[in-house]
């Protein structure tokens, strides 16, 4: 694997991690609002499907000329980069939308059975003890 392909792999890792974070952040927000893991994953997937797909499709379409070698000199250097990113992004988008939510639900169910702290527990503080500064 050449240097350009390795750079493409690093780009791919950044995009994939960002997509997973975008999805799981929303799922975690739904969990803190009191949703169970499965409902939170379904709602999170429903609301983040379009942004994740748009990111992947836009990146793939932007890299197509580079992957096909269109554009003059330097194609032999940038072509492996584009091929790695396009192939990896296609695969990882499917995995992000299917495998990541599935693993999240499995881990949360194991966590709940083992006595771990569920995500949706929110510590409530007694507001009577919190001093409120006077308005001046």
Image: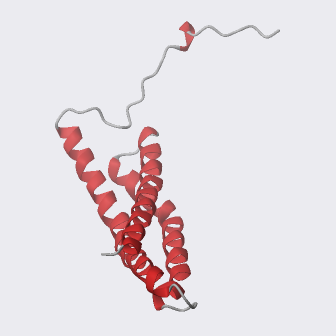
- Residue sitting at x 62%, y 7%: 131
Q: Which residue reaches farthest right?
A: 136
Rendered image quadrant of residue 8: bottom left
State how the image is colored: secondary structure
The location of residue 45, given as percent across then percent down, is 43, 61
Q: Is residue 6 shown above or below 127?
A: below
- Residue sitting at x 49%, y 91%: 69
Q: Is residue 17 shown above or below 68?
A: above
- Residue sitting at x 44%, y 86%: 76
Q: Foreground residue, 10 or 35? A: 10
Q: Is residue 109 left or right of residue 31?
A: left
Looking at the rendered image, the quarter that the N terminus falls into is: bottom left
Looking at the rendered image, the quarter that the C terminus falls into is: top right
Q: Foreground residue, 105 or 25? A: 25
Rendered image quadrant of residue 111: top left
The location of residue 83, given as percent across then percent down, is 40, 81
Q: Foreground residue, 53 or 27? A: 53
Q: Is residue 116 left or right of residue 121?
A: left
- Residue sitting at x 42%, y 29%: 122
């Amino acid at each position: 694997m050449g240097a350009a392909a390795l750079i493409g792999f690093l780009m791919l890792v950044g995009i994939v991690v960002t997509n997973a974070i975008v999805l799981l952040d929303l799922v975690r927000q739904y969990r803190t609002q009191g949703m169970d893991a499965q409902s939170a994953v379904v709602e999170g997937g429903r609301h983040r499907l379009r942004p994740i797909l748009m990111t992947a499709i836009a990146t793939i379409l932007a890299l197509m000329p580079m992957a096909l070698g269109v554009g003059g000199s330097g194609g032999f250097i940038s072509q492996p980069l584009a091929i790695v990113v396009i192939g990896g992004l296609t695969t990882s988008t499917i995995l992000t939308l299917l495998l990541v939510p599935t693993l999240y639900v499995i881990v949360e169910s194991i966590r709940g059975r083992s006595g771990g702290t569920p995500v949706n527990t929110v510590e409530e503080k007694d507001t009577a003890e919190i001093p409120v500064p006077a308005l001046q």
